[in-house]
Every structure is written in structure tokens, then in C-alpha cells.
């Protein structure tokens, strides 16, 4: 409390006056809330109505109805000394009944508002997280475990539910209840009002103090939890390796270590939690004993009535239940903030590949590609390309060959802007691709990657992914050309067959043929095939070569292949070596030259390895 500088944590309502978040979290409370706020404000009427109605119900249940119980008991305890006993009691009873009714109506109304706004906000947050995460670049996803990303998204959305629930049901309702009790006490038994207020301040200060201490253990706990999740997901996606290398025992042992680390982190955090509970329990006990003592003394002195003693008892009961929960709620609230901040870290991350604020409108038509003094490396010290130059004419068919790791796939990733150049530029039809919107650029490139991954959806949906306007006839026609129709029709569900996660239920060659059909549907002036036929047998490849010729006609094409037969007929073959063009020319030129290509060719008979 003492070290807390409100201005730094954003000030206003958001700092809740007592919490100094900047020192605790990676981000200020304001930053975290700023990701929730735009979605909250859309439903501001129902959002604020919950506060009003729950607040009203708490004022009634917390302080007004006990006041009527007190009055009724006072009348009863005085017995015959009261005139018009019956009328008085009945009128008190009717008022009490009306307040009880009002309490219920307010509370249930608030429940409906709560469901209305919370479900909508949660939906919008899920959508927002989906939208934001998919904006990140290809490299971002290669650097992050998909399992822990999914867990972070779930925690970010779930955290809102916790933050909202605790704010409404604990902070707000308890605050209203306590305030109204204190007001009534000051009004009826001032000395007890004072005792209650001092106690409340002491209780809240102590809770904040401890919870703040606990937060670093909570962080550690959630860090270890992410590690466990990530390991689970890594193991599950590598299950084939585990079976193949019979490494289940080793994996289990190393998992046990990670799991034990989570237990250690948990037990530290939870032990401190127990200490907090014990201290809170102590303060509650003190209040219970002291409150009753004061009430009895005051009754003995004749300062308060029997009804007031009951009133004190009811108030204390009400306070105990809600304030005990408040302590736990503060802990849950902090924990939710720390979980949310993991995702906020990702939201705040600058996109590796971002569109310009005002991108040029895309005028790609013919597909002439120029790389000019291009520099690129995945990391600072290791460059894949240093000053790379290449011009590919519109409609030209270029074969790209070279040793593994020479940068062929990287070149296609650069062209697709999965990664951005560090220096120099890439132009298509004279337009620098860095100035284009990524989606506009990619609409103009059909790409078949080295390893095709499919959605766990039907084959039809996977093929139509290339063009959502495609008709059933077009889908079948593309599949026929890609020689995919044969195997698809042999499945009992045909085009409705589900392909399994990432397409695992298909063979490598089948997956590739689906990818080829998908690319055929995409009407793009540029075509890139990265080892697109590597999983096909030689007969299938020969068949597909015909359809490739159709696919390539009128398109600028880059074909990457290790199997030289695939690129033999290209207009030009480029041999890449360590990110540089080592040789270029037609198949015939390069054979005559007898360089790297000639060497590679010699090891393959008619393009196939001997
Ligand atoms: P192959 O014929 O085996 O497919 P390639 O010519 O396509 O090889 P690239 O995939 O372009 O090779 O890789 C070029 C270099 O960049 C390699 O040294 C590789 O280790 C490195 N590299 C590729 N992807 C990444 C990545 N995401 N992060 C860091 N380095 C990478
Ligand atoms: Mg490659």
C-alpha cells in the first residue's frame, strides 16, 4: 500500500486505488484491461445494469432486512409494554416481505443481465484472439508451441470470466454490503460502526499485502503449468517418434521431472495461500469475539436493545461469509490477471510481417518477378541470402535446384512474404511486395509446399480452399487433373471423407495430389511448387506432369525439385548454392557446362537416382 504510486498504474477507477500493478505484472492493469474494455463497452447497458441491480439487492439483503428483523425482535422482546403490538408487527412484517421480494427481483434481473453481457463479451474475446493470433507471421508460429498458444488463448478468455465474476460478485457486492452495514451501524450503534470500519480497513490491507507477496509464486506456478502443457502437446504430436524409438520410458521420466517442478511451484504458492487464510481467519475470529463482547456490554449498560444484539449477530454472519470469499476472490483476480498478461504479451508483440498503414493497391497481372540486392537471414548472425539478384520474366518457367539448405524454400517464403527481406527488395510486375497487403499478394500466388498440411475437414472443403467460389464440377475437374479423383472416389465417403488432423489419414502422395488440385482451382498468375512431386511414384509423376503443363500454362512458375527429371523441361534452371546463384541456363546448357548441375545429373539416371 505504502509503495503504491497510483498515477503510475494508470490512475482512476482502473487502479482500484490500492493495487500497484506495474511492479507485479509484465503489463499495467490498464494495458490488460484495455484489451477487454472495447468488448465490454459494446454491451455497456447490460454491463452496468448488473452493477446497479446486484448493488441494490445487496443493500436490501445486507443491511435493510436485518434492520427489520431487529425492529421485530425489539417489539417482541418488549412484549406487553408495546401498544398496538399487532398492528406494529404486521406493518413491519409487510415491509420486510416487500424488501425480501424486491431483493429477489433485483438479484434475478441482474443474473439475466449478467448472462446477456458475459456470454457476448466472451464470444467477442474468443473472436478477437482468433483474429489477432492468425495475424502473426509464419516465423512466429515456428517459434511458439501450438499447444501453449492454445492454452494461453483459453486462459485469456477464461480470465475475463474470472475477472468479471470476482469484480461483480465479490468486490462490488461485498463493498456495497459492507458500506451499507457500516452506514446502518454508525446510525444505530456508532461505536460498533467504528470497530467494523477499522477492522475492514485492517482486513483489506492485510489481504492486499499478502496477495501481492503471493503473486510471484503464482507467476512461477503458471509458468510451470505452461511448460507441462507444452510438453504434453510436443509429445502428442511426436507420438510416432516415441513409438518408433521406444522412448516412452525416457519421455515419461523427463515428464515426471517437469511435473514435479510444477508441484513444487504449486506447493510454494498454495502454502503461502494457507498462511493468508490463517491470518484472515484470525482477523475474522477477533471480530466475532470482539463484536459480541461489545454488543453484550452495550446491552448490559442499557445502551442497545435485544434486537440490536441480534442485528450485530446477523451483520457479522453476513460479513464473514462475504469477506472470507473476498480474500479468495482477490487471489483469483490476481491469478486471472497474470494469466491474461501472457496473452497480452503476444498481442503487444510487434508483427514480424506487417502491412503498411496505407498499402498500395495490388496490380499484379503478368507475374514478372525481380529480386534486387536482397538480404535475408532468419537470425542476425546467419544470413541465407546476401545481396541476391534474380529476374524471372512473366510466364517464364524456372526450375530451382541445389543442395539441401541452400535456400530454395526460403526464397519462396520471401516471395510469399511469410518472412520479410532485411534489405533490398522483391518486385512483382514492378511493385515492391513490401508495399502490398499480404492478402492481396498471396491471392496472386498458388503455392504447393514441401509438406502439405490439410485441415481436419472433408476432402471437398480442403480442395475448395483454393477458391471458395468453386462449383462441384470445378472441384471434380481439378481433382481429375491432379489425379486425385481416382483415390477419392475409392473412399466410401468420397469427397466427404474427413482427412484427420493435419491430413494424417492420407498417404503423403495423396496429400500432395489434394494440394495440387487445390492449387489448380486458385486462379493465380504465379505458381510455386516446392518439391510438389517428391512423394509421388514415378508413374504418377509422369501422369501429373501433363496436368502440371496445363497448370503452368500462362503462369510464371517456380519449380523446386531434387529429382531433376521434374525440372528438365523448364525454360531456365537455376542452381542455388549457399544462397547464391551458382549456375543458370537450360538443361542442355548446364549439362554442357558440366558444373554442379552436371554433377547432380550424373548421379541420377534420367533424373532419377541410380
Ligand atoms: P531443402 O532442399 O532441404 O528443402 P532448402 O534449400 O529449401 O532445403 P531452406 O529451407 O530454404 O533450404 O533453408 C535455408 C537455411 O535456412 C537452412 O540452413 C535452414 O536451416 C535455415 N532455416 C530454414 N527455416 C528456418 C527457420 N524457420 N528458422 C531459422 N532458420 C531456418
Ligand atoms: Mg526446402
Image (spheres, helix red, strand yellow):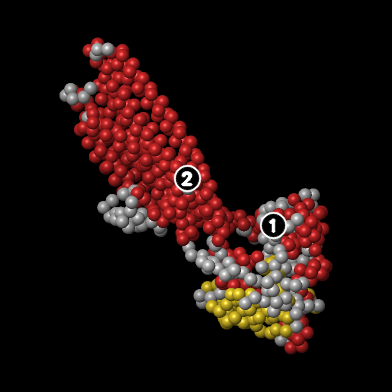
Q: What residue is drawn where x is 75% and y is 72%?
A: 554
Q: Circle 2: is it few (<14), some (14-19), or many (20+) Cα within 10 Å?
A: some
Give the x, y percent position of residue 580.
Answer: 62, 82
| Residue 151 showing in the rendered view | no
- Quadrant in the rendering for residue 204: top left
Label 2, secondary structure: give it. loop
Q: Nearer the viewer, residue 76 or 383?
A: 76
Q: Residue furthest bottom?
A: 593
**Quadrant showing the C terminus:** bottom right
Q: What residue is drawn where x is 32% and y is 30%?
A: 63
Give the x, y percent position of residue 203.
Answer: 29, 41
Q: Is residue 348 left or right of residue 372?
A: left
The residue that mark 1 highlights is 468
Q: Is mark 2 within 8 Å of ligand 1?
A: no
Cα–Cα span, label 2 and label 1: 34 Å
Q: Circle 1: is it few (<14), some (14-19), or many (20+) Cα within 10 Å?
A: few
Give the x, y percent position of residue 132.
Answer: 53, 58
Q: Is residue 444 left or right of residue 546?
A: left
Q: What residue is drawn where x is 51% and y is 66%?
A: 357
Label 1, secondary structure: give it. loop
The residue that mark 2 highlights is 43
- Quadrant in the rendering for residue 385: bottom right
| Residue 176 showing in the rendered view | yes
Establish if 336 lies above or below 548: above
Going from the N terminus, do you reach mark 2 or mark 1 first? 2
Establish if 568 lies above or below 92: below
Q: Nearer the viewer, residue 427 or 570?
A: 427
Q: Is mark 1 within 8 Å of ligand 2?
A: no
Q: Nearer the viewer, residue 293 or 4?
A: 4
- Quadrant in the rendering for residue 584: bottom right
Residue 35 numbered mark, or none? none
Give the x, y percent position of residue 240.
Answer: 66, 58
Amino acid at each position: 500500500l505504502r509503495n503504491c504510486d497510483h498515477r503510475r498504474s494508470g490512475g482512476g477507477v482502473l487502479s482500484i486505488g490500492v493495487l500497484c500493478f506495474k511492479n507485479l505484472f509484465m503489463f499495467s492493469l490498464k494495458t490488460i484491461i484495455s484489451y477487454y474494455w472495447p468488448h465490454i463497452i459494446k454491451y455497456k447497458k447490460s454491463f452496468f445494469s448488473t452493477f446497479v441491480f446486484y448493488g441494490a439487492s445487496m443493500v436490501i439483503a445486507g443491511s435493510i432486512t436485518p434492520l427489520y428483523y431487529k425492529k421485530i425482535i425489539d417489539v417482541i422482546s418488549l412484549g406487553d409494554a408495546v401498544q398496538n403490538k399487532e398492528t406494529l408487527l404486521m406493518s413491519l412484517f409487510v415491509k420486510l416481505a416487500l424488501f425480501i421480494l424486491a431483493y429477489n427481483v433485483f438479484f434475478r434481473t441482474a443474473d439475466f443481465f449478467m448472462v446477456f453481457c458475459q456470454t457476448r463479451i466472451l464470444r467477442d474475446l474468443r473472436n478477437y484472439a482468433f483474429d489477432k493470433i492468425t495475424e502473426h507471421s509464419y516465423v512466429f508460429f515456428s517459434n511458439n508451441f501450438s499447444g501453449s498458444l492454445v492454452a494461453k488463448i483459453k486462459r485469456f478468455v477464461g480470465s475475463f470470466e474470472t475477472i468479471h465474476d470476482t469484480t461483480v460478485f465479490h468486490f462490488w457486492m461485498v463493498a456495497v454490503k459492507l458500506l451499507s452495514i457500516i452506514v446502518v451501524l454508525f446510525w444505530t450503534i456508532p461505536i460498533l460502526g467504528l470497530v467494523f470500519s477499522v477492522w475492514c480497513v485492517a482486513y483489506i490491507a492485510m489481504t492486499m499485502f499478502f496477495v501481492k507477496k503471493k503473486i510471484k509464486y503464482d507467476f512461477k506456478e503458471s509458468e510451470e503449468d505452461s511448460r507441462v502443457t507444452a510438453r504434453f502437446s510436443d509429445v502428442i504430436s511426436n507420438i510416432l517418434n516415441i513409438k518408433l524409438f521406444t522412448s516412452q520410458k525416457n519421455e515419461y521420466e523427463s515428464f515426471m521431472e517437469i511435473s514435479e517442478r510444477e508441484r513444487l511451484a504449486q506447493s510454494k504458492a498454495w502454502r503461502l495461500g494457507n498462511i493468508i487464510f490463517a491470518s484472515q481467519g484470525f482477523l475474522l475470529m477477533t471480530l466475532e469475539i470482539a463484536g459480541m463482547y461489545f454488543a453484550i456490554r452495550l446491552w448490559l449498560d442499557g445502551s442497545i436493545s435485544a434486537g440490536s444484539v441480534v442485528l450485530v449477530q446477523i451483520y457479522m454472519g453476513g460479513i464473514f461469509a462475504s469477506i472470507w470469499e473476498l480474500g479468495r476472490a482477490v487471489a483469483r483476480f490476481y491469478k486471472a490477471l497474470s494469466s491474461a498478461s501472457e496473452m497480452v504479451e503476444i498481442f503487444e508483440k510487434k508483427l514480424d510481417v506487417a502491412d503498411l498503414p496505407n498499402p498500395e493497391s495490388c496490380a499484379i497481372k503478368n507475374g514478372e518477378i525481380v529480386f534486387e540486392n536482397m538480404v535475408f537471414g532468419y537470425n542476425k548472425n546467419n544470413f541465407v541470402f546476401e545481396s541476391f539478384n534474380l529476374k524471372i520474366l512473366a510466364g517464364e518457367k524456372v526450375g530451382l535446384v541445389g543442395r539441401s539448405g541452400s535456400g530454395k524454400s526460403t526464397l519462396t517464403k520471401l516471395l510469399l512474404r511469410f518472412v520479410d527481406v532485411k534489405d533490398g527488395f522483391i518486385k512483382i510486375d514492378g511493385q515492391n511486395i513490401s508495399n502490398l497487403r499480404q492478402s492481396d499478394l498471396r491471392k496472386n500466388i498458388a503455392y504447393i509446399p514441401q509438406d502439405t498440411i490439410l485441415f481436419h475437414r472433408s476432402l471437398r472443403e480442403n480442395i475448395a480452399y483454393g477458391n471458395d467460389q468453386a462449383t462441384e464440377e470445378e472441384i471434380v475437374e481439378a481433382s481429375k487433373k491432379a489425379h486425385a479423383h481416382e483415390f477419392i472416389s475409392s473412399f466410401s465417403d468420397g469427397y466427404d471423407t474427413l482427412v484427420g488432423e493435419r491430413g494424417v489419414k492420407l498417404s503423403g502422395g495423396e496429400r500432395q495430389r489434394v494440394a495440387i488440385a487445390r492449387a489448380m482451382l486458385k486462379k493465380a498468375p504465379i505458381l510455386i511448387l516446392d518439391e510438389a512431386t517428391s512423394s509421388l511414384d514415378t508413374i504418377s509423376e509422369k501422369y501429373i506432369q501433363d496436368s502440371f503443363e496445363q497448370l503452368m500454362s500462362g503462369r510464371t512458375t517456380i519449380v523446386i525439385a531434387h529429382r531433376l527429371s521434374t525440372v528438365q523441361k523448364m525454360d531456365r534452371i537455376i542452381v542455388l548454392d549457399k544462397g547464391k546463384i551458382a549456375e543458370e541456363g537450360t538443361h542442355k546448357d548446364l549439362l554442357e557446362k558440366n558444373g554442379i548441375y552436371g554433377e547432380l545429373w550424373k548421379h541420377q539416371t534420367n533424373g532419377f537416382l541410380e
